[in-house]
Structures are given as C-alpha cells and as structure tokens.
Image (cartoon, helix red, strand yellow):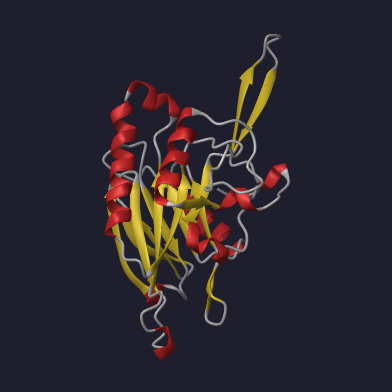
Amino acid sequence: MRADKECFRFNFGTFNVRGLSCEIKQNQLVEDFDRYKLDILCVQETKIKNGGDWTIRGHRVLLYETECRHYGNGFIIHKNLEPKVLRTWKISDRLCVLQISLDYGNAQNKGKVKSLTIINLYAPTSALTKNNPDELDKFYNDLQTLIDSLPNNTIIIFAGDFNSKVGKRSGEEICLGNYSRGFRNENGENLVDFCEKNKLFITNTAFNKAARHITTWVGSRKNNENKTVYVYNQIDYIICRQGQKHLITNAQSYGGTKV
C-alpha cells in the first residue's frame, strides 16, 4: 500500500496464529514477519490471557489480554515504524486498533490525510453465529461505532479473519472487484451488506491471482466413499474505503510460514 507515493509506502498483513503463548512460536512469527518484509502484522487467536508488550528482533510485539481463551488479538510493528505510532487500543476480544501518523510536517499536506488507522478484526464463525446471532450483532455494532468515530482525514484499513465467504459479485455491488470467486455464505452476506452500507472495498477481489494466493483457510472432510477431501476457502481479507482503494497496490495470501 502507498499513502503518498513520495513519502510513505508499506506492507501489512493479517494472520490467525491459533495460539501464540509459546516463546518459540513468537520468535518464529517475527522471523516470518521479517521474511515477508512486513511493516505491520495483525494477529488473531493469540490465546494469551494476560497479553503483553515487548520487543523481538527489534520489532514491537503488542498482544492484548483476552477474556476468552480462544480469542486474543494484537499487532507486530516494525521497529522503523514504531516512532510513528500515535495510539493503540482494544475494543473487544474481536477488535483492536492501531493508528500511525502520516503527518511529515509538510505545509502542502495541511488539511489532507494525517493518519492511517488499522483495524484488526476476528469475526464470529458461521457455527457460532447460527446459535448465537447476538454475537454477530455485537461485532458489527462495535465496528460501526468505531468507524463513525474516526475522522475523514485518516486512511482506514480493515485486516483480519472475517470467517466469511463473500463469493462472486452480484448485481450492482461495488464492494467487490472483478476477481471475486466461489459462493457466498450467510456470514459473507453480512460482510458484503456492511461494506456496501459503509462504502468499503474488499481489496483481495481486485487482483487476478492463482488459487494458492487466494486461499486463506484449508480444511478437510470425508466424502461418501470415506475418502478425505480438502476444502480451500478465502475467509481473511484486507478492506479499505472505496475512495482509498487506489492506494492498494496488491493483496494476496501466502503459504509457507514457520508458525
């Protein structure tokens, strides 16, 4: 992503780590962070009850405490970007926020974009929302309240595990690009509705990528012949405002991490 082609360009990612309490795993994650040349990484499902804020390989590792042992979120922030951090805060076990200054003291930038706001999300799964619809309502209500509170002169990036399959673009939808694929589930319908309402854009659907750079989740099931069938889904996304989608230069998934 570029916020200004002359002064600010960086890479960010999102990763459901499925537990990060082990020190070895924390170090492996930061090695992956360096290997993929990231500036900011949003992490979900850290499962660290008390959280923490420390440094590994010079980078800041900020993990929030969690009330539920299955949740937990946070950020890894590159050491060169840390001085630009304005604020970080937790909204819930499913939402946390990082704000970065983009104000370089340039008089020509007066009144223009001043900051970047990265919202780290972990949405409820389809199985959970089926039995507990209030969980999904709270998630989107909290997210809406956050968006409404942000100023117009900040770039907003949503990054996380949305547990949603958005499928192909339908009708006059503007939140999806030309390369959305597959079918849409109920969680995906809720996400698309939210994006349409708030004029957001799901950037993963804007780039023509091979299947290995689309998949973000792999599962398996048994077929009628009791053979294992693998399932490949895209449920993690990077989302931005419609008016800021030109700033995104690439969005894809990667396989091959130490974690």
Q: Nearer the viewer, residue 86 or 148?
A: 148
Q: Quadrant of residue 125?
A: top left
Q: Quadrant of residue 231?
A: top right
Q: Nearer the viewer, residue 141 or 224?
A: 141
Tag count: 0
Question: Is any atom of residue 139 visible in this view?
Answer: yes
**Which quadrant holds the N terminus?**
bottom right
Q: Nearer the viewer, residue 194 or 24?
A: 194
> Residue 144 location in percent, x, y?
31, 48
222 above or below 209? above
| x 70%, y 15%: residue | 227
Q: Quadrant of residue 156?
A: bottom left
Relative to 14, 252 lies left or right: right
123 above or below 79? above
56 above or below 160? below
> Residue 47 location in percent, x, y?
37, 42
The residue most toward the right is: 210
| x 31%, y 44%: residue | 93
| x 43%, y 88%: residue | 108
The residue most toward the top is: 224
The residue most toward the front is: 172
> Residue 16 location in percent, x, y?
48, 44
Question: Is any atom of residue 23 visible in this view?
Answer: no
